[in-house]
Structure formats: structure tokens, C-alpha cells
Amino acid sequence: MTAFLNDSLTIAKRNLLKIKRVPDLIVFTTLQPIMFVLLFGYVFGSLAGSGAAVQGGYREFMMAGIFTQTIIFGATITGFMMAEDMQKGVIDRFRTLPMHPSAVLFGRTFVDVLNNVLVLIVMSLTGLLIGWRIRGSFLDAAVAYLLMLLFAFGLSWLFAFIGLKVRSPEVVNNASFMVIFPVTFIANTFVPSENMPSALKAFAGWNPVSTITQAAREGFGNLYALSGGQDPAAVEKATRYTWALEHPVLYSAIWALVLLAIFIPLSTRAYKKAVAK
């Protein structure tokens, strides 16, 4: 176990050094969330209606959605990096080293967790500058952040598996965009899903992207940002129209644990096959 942890930390250090040597990567990783917050906050906010209160309410409403979308896109980095290491023969070099086979994968996904922490901090600070506020308790907000990181960790293992199965990093990018865009937009990330057409509303109601967003929105105390003075009980009834949205923390945690239970062994097996060739 000690050897496995040491090997994982060595790989994590290698990935951190790689970021240090390519500072452009960390610059654009932090600039992109800022751009998302400003773009969605002011462009989509202008569609919510006129008036500073309405647009400010929308910016508060959409922050949970922006958090969720960003960590999901961030998880694709794992797949891209694994595919790139496979393509460049880095994995072949690891094969010659006396290290635990799973250490490469755990080291890679651990760095992605650190990257997501940095991104969430940058986005939170940007959100605070444009008027977003955490109106819930410190504990509820902490649970919301931890839940997003757990879900992103599960997705990183999914994309690690994909990265080990495809022939080039470009395939990971193209495939992930085709899946992630519809999944993140047919959800309550940027607009209330209860107002969608019935088929889309049903999909959004069980979409884990919606439940992660709902959990974060409730944890931050932003559920009533678009209510316009409506009765809180009516808002809760409208937004929690499925069991998944009624229990967003539990449902999202189950999704994250299922992803980990499925893709940790699958990715490890795929890695062993790759280095055995």
C-alpha cells in the first residue's frame, strides 16, 4: 500500500511538473472559467429580462450551472492526457519502471482533482465580483463543493478509460463535446428545467447534471434567485419535480460512486492491457 501511494504521488508530481513547464496550460485553465462566468452571466443574464435585480438574480441562479459544466469539461482533460501519453509512448516508458500499474491512473486523476479545486476557487471569486453570494450555511456550501469534486473525480475515471481505448487525443475531444453539450444543456444548468417541453423536462429531471446543479444551488442558498418574490414552497415544489431532484445530494453521490465502482477496475484493466502489448 505504501509503495502504491508513493508511486501515485510520483506520477502526480510528474503531471504537476508538466503543468509548470507548460504555463500556458494553467493560464488558459484559469482564464476559461472566468470567461464562462462573465459570458453566461451577462449575455444570458440579459435574456432573463430588464432590470438590475432580474439580471443579478439570473447571475446568482446560473453560478451552480457554470460550476457543474466546468468541472464536467475539466474531466475530459484526463482522457486527453491519457490518450496523448499512449500516442507519444510515455506509457511504454512507464512499463519499464517497477511501479504499481494503477499508480499512473490514480496520479493522473488526483492532479485533476487539484485542478478542479483551483478552477472552483477562481470561478467563485469571479462570481463574487459580479454579485453572486452564498446565502446558505458554511456546511451546506462545503457539501456542495465536495459533491462537485466527487462527481468530477468519477468522471475523470470514465474519461481515463476512454483515453486508453481511443487512438488519438483528438478523438477524446470530439467525442466528449458531442456528449457533454446536450447533457449539460438539457438540464437546469442555465434555465429552469421545469419550463422545458415534457420530453426534455423528463430527461432533465433525472439527468445527473441537473441534480449536481440542484444540489449546489440549494447548498449555496441560490434556489430562489429567480423566484421574483414567489412563495419559497412553490419554488421548491416546481424545481423538485422528480425523486432525483428531490434528493439531489443522494442521487448525485450515487452516480459518482457508481462511476468509480465501474471505471476504476475497467480503466486499470485497460491500462494493464495497454502496457502488456
Image: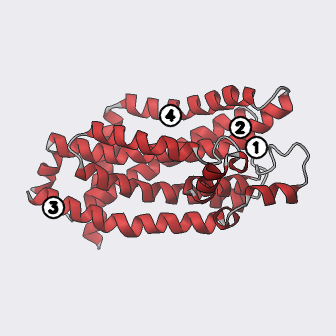
Percent x, y of residue 18: 30, 39
Q: CA distance from mark 2 to mark 3?
A: 47 Å
Depth check: give the residue in front, 22 or 131.
131
Secondary structure beneath dot 1 equals loop
Mark carried by residue 133: 1
Depth check: give the residue in front, 39 or 201.
201
Secondary structure beneath dot 2 equals helix
Q: CA distance from mark 2 to mark 4?
A: 16 Å
Q: Which of pointers 2 and 3 indicates the residue nearer the eye?
A: 3
Q: Which residue is mark 4?
A: 30
Q: Are marks 3 and 1 in contact (CB under 8 Å)?
A: no
- The mark tally for this picture is 4
Residue 174 appears in the figure: yes
Q: CA distance from mark 1 to mark 4?
A: 21 Å
Percent x, y of residue 230: 90, 49
Q: Is residue 31 above or below residue 143?
A: above
What's the amino acid at mark 4? Thr
Q: Is residue 9 left or right of residue 56?
A: left
For image coordinates 58% across by 38% down, the residue present is 122
What's the amino acid at mark 1? Arg
Q: Are marks 2 and 1 in contact (CB under 8 Å)?
A: yes
Mark carried by residue 128: 2
